[in-house]
Image (cartoon, helix red, strand yellow):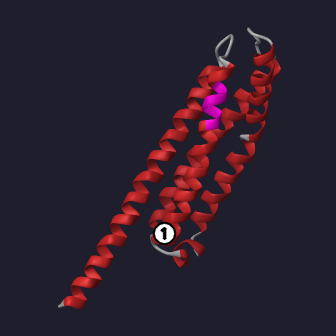
Amino acid sequence: MLAAYTVLTSFAKAAMHDLVLAILHHLLFLGLIVMLASELALLRTPEPPVKRLAGLDAGYGVTALLIILVGVGRVMGGKGWAFYEANPFFWAKIATFALIGLISIRPTLLILKWRKAAKSAPGYVPPQGELTAARRAIGLEILLLIPLLAFAAAMARWPF
């Protein structure tokens, strides 16, 4: 009886741990979406607030890192590596997330450049061509969230 209780308690703790990580993973992802959408909206204004853009972009980077860390925790503490290792949708999700990360480098570098310029020249407005490049990259990042979400849903239901 005690052994059964111990097993059930251990299972319940593991399930609760996985649930907490899943909730945190989803909340972080929602935050990432909000930050990207906010950046895109600010980049569409005639004179985007560079300082606010820099803050959002830094928050985006930290959130992306936290998503990775929580995701690793979910892999190790949830269904286990064996489930994910053989899951093609897991790898598609990881590849898409990595691609989004690579695409985000250009806007981040531009925003850092703009922030530096704005510190030395109050009222600085980024060049239109650079604003367009940043908008396109962030728009592509947002677009790639669609397959990422589809891969996440398929991953959770694998094998069909």
Residue in view at x 57 percent, y 45 percent: 63
23 vs 145, left or right, is: left
Indicate the quadrant where residue 122 lies.
Answer: top right
Q: Any magenta on residue 55?
A: yes
Indicate the quadrant where residue 48 lies.
Answer: top right
How many numbered marks have been drawn onto this rendered protein structure?
Answer: 1
Q: Any magenta on residue 151?
A: no
Residue in view at x 63 percent, y 64 percent: 91
Quarter of the image with the N terminus in it: bottom left
Give the farthest residue toward the left: 1
Q: x, y percentage for residue 127?
A: 81, 16
Q: x, y percentage for residue 29?
A: 51, 46
Q: How crowded is mark 1: few (under 14 residues within 10 Å), some or many (20 or more)?
A: some
- Chain part drawn in magenta: 53-58
Mark 1 is on which residue type?
A: Trp
Q: x, y percentage for residue 86?
A: 59, 75
137 vs 74, left or right, is: right
Q: x, y percentage for residue 128?
A: 79, 16
66 vs 79, left or right, is: right
Residue in view at x 48 percent, y 41 percent: 30
Q: The residue tagged with tag 1: helix, strand or loop? A: loop
Relative vertical location of residue 65 with respect to residue 110 in this rendering, above or below: below
Residue in view at x 45 percent, y 70 percent: 78
Q: Report if residue 160 is visible in the image.
A: no
Question: Closer to the camera, 3 or 153?
Answer: 3
Which residue is denoted by mark 1 in the rendering?
Answer: 158
Q: Is the magenta stretch mostly helix, strand or loop?
A: helix
